[in-house]
Image (cartoon, rainbow, N blue to C red):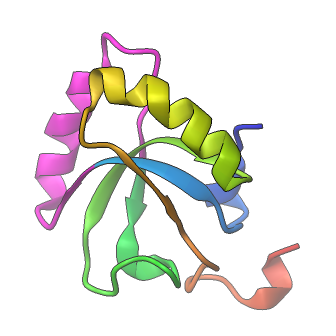
Amino acid sequence: TEVLGEALVNAKPFWGIFAYATQDYSETFSFSDRTVDTPYEPGFVITNQWENLNQETWYCLCLGFFQTEEEARIELKNAKKYFPDAYVKYSGRSLMHSESTIN
């Protein structure tokens, strides 16, 4: 089950399909325009806000957020039709919220 908004709003760990990463904030938004003719609604992740992602600041375009690796890998097959370099990665816990806000 995709948990697109829930992962970011509730700061819950997620499995994401990462399509693009840059250290230039403005570049991420121009890349998101490439999702217009795809079935994906882009989401953005800042890597240093998550335990298992790069601790340098990278702005990532994600094509989906999932509860399990299996769900993400199934959708990755479709995502690669539009973004051949897309990959799946686990976020770990949020570094921006206390444990009490994560259920």
Whether residue 54 is situated above or below residue 37 in the rendered picture: below
Residue 40: percent from the left, percent from the top? 45, 24
Q: Quick check: 49 left or right of 98?
A: left
Picture quarter containing residue 24?
bottom left
- In front: 52, or 9? 52
Q: Quick check: 32 left or right of 91?
A: left
Residue 82: percent from the left, percent from the top? 29, 22
Answer whether residue 59 is magenta in the image. Answer: no
Residue pushed farthest top?
37
Whether residue 67 is situated above or below residue 98 in the rendered picture: above
Residue 69: percent from the left, percent from the top? 65, 54
Residue 32: percent from the left, percent from the top? 26, 34
Q: Please report the residue visible at 22 percent of the width from the left and 41 percent of the height from the top.
A: 29
Picture quarter containing residue 74?
top right
| Quarter of the picture holding the N terminus | top right
Q: Quick check: 53 left or right of 36?
A: right
Q: Please report the residue visible at 80 percent of the width from the left and 76 percent of the height from the top.
A: 102
Q: Magenta region: which residues? A: 20-43
Q: Please report the residue visible at 54 percent of the width from the left and 70 percent of the height from the top.
A: 91
Picture quarter containing residue 37?
top left
Answer whether residue 42 is magenta in the image. Answer: yes
Q: Is residue 15 visible?
A: yes
Residue pushed farthest right?
103
| Quarter of the picture holding the C terminus | bottom right
Q: Quick check: 75 left or right of 86?
A: right
